[in-house]
Image: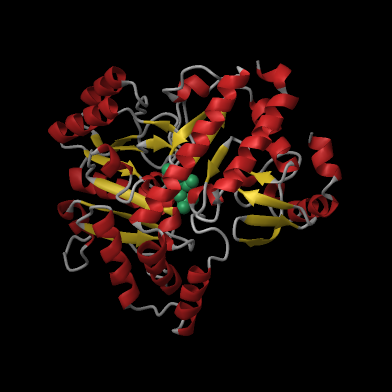
Amino acid sequence: AKAQFAAKRPKTHAMHKRAAHVMPGGNTRTVLFTAPFPLRVETASGSTITDIDGHSYLDLLGEYSAGIYGHSHPRILEAARAALDKGLNYGAHHEGEVKLAEVVTQRFNMDLVRFTNSGTEANMMALAAARCFTGRSKIMPMAGGYHGGTLYFSHGASPVNAPFDCVMGEYNDIETTRKLIADNADQLAAVILEPMLGGGGGISASPAFLAMLRAETQTRGIVLIFDEVMTSRLHPGGLSAKVGIEPDLKTLGKYVGGGMSFGAFGGRADIMALFDPTSPTALPHAGTFNNNTLTMNVGHVAMTEIYTPAACAELNARGDRLREKLNDLFMRYQVKMKAMGQGSMIVIHPTSGEISTPHDIEDTDKRLRQLLFLDLLEQGIYIAERGFMALSLMVTDADCDRVVRAVEDYVNRRRELLV
Ligand code: PMP
């Protein structure tokens, strides 16, 4: 499959070699590398991307969930042009940031919010705020969680670049994690987790696990942070609103900025007040592009006119239908495959067993994931190699049916590997 992929993409191959002269492995964004070399896109429009060798694909990756509006949404383009016409970035405050902050705080139930340029930064700042607020130093992420490119937390001796002293929690393991919190209570500033693991495989936190975390952190004065960088798209008020459990702080990213670089963190007024610059002990949080005019203005239009609560509900219902059809297919063919996730985010795993913690997918066959990725590319459908898909508003029910047919074709062709 790899040889076939390479043979059909001579320009992409040449460009990859050129890129490797100036970027390590030809790459400036690790998650985009796929063997033998990754796609290289020339243009994108609607739900279609076209590579430099002239092949077109249905874009089901959806920029890892940031690309909710599809490519070149007319209202987004109009908003971007209007913002550019008023001058790009002032080195001063403007109304755009107030308007976006009003929408974001209201929609995601935050007292106060601050903007950043990425989800990574939002998490860095939320964790810094928790440490400052509690006067404690350690934080508890969950094994298998993801919070950004400079925040790698892992088991083992020396996480390569974890900037904080960590105690790793166990996702969906109530008793183990409760005990870890109790044992480290005096030193823990924050517990941070995604209410559904995005990059970690579309595994949802059980309501009981979240309720335990809420109760334990509350009694022990630990700041509970939900990383909703991905999951905020699953409900108009984010996944915390859907499950009915409110953390102390939330972080956002991806689509909220209308497809421009974006991140935000916010929540309880007493914690966020740490950043009030009129306070003599204010925590500094600078960032040249925090209030950049493009993100602020386009984000406001995107959240108020395009990704409305009704559009959100419709998109997630479409994703639920697709996931159901895929799982029906896997059942019918009795193959070791399973579609996880919620709403408009779907992750296909090469296993049919129960998946409730990250450990349940640790040993799945990476080659089967690669094969699905390459076989779907052959059929003109682009997903992440790890099986992740995020629907954009441009993806139709007919597109979803096409995806089901393509996956059925994969199942038929690769059946002996999948039973
Ligand atoms: N948190 C989660 C849950 C994410 O999925 C991501 C990005 N995939 C991030 C944080 C980091 O966001 P960014 O890439 O914008 O820094």
The quarter of the displayed image where residue 117 is located: bottom left
Is 152 in front, or is 135? 152
| Residue 235 in picture, x, y percent from top left | 34, 47
Q: Count numbered badges in the picture.
A: 0
Q: Residue 340, relative to residue 309: is it above or below?
A: above
Q: Residue 404, relative to residue 171: is it above or below?
A: below
Is 297 in front, or is 288? 297
| Residue 305 in picture, x, y percent from top left | 38, 66
Residue 290 in sight in this render? no
In the rendered image, the quadrant that contains the N terminus is top right
Find the residue positioned furthest to the bottom: 86
In the rendered view, does 44 fall on the left or right side of 267?
A: right
Residue at horizontal 42 percent and vertical 51 percent from the top: 119
In the rendered image, the quadrant that contains the C terminus is top right
In the rendered view, does 343 fall on the left or right side of 175?
A: right
In the rendered view, does 320 fall on the left or right side of 45?
A: left
| Residue 71 in picture, x, y percent from top left | 57, 61
Residue at horizontal 76 percent and vertical 54 percent from the top: 21
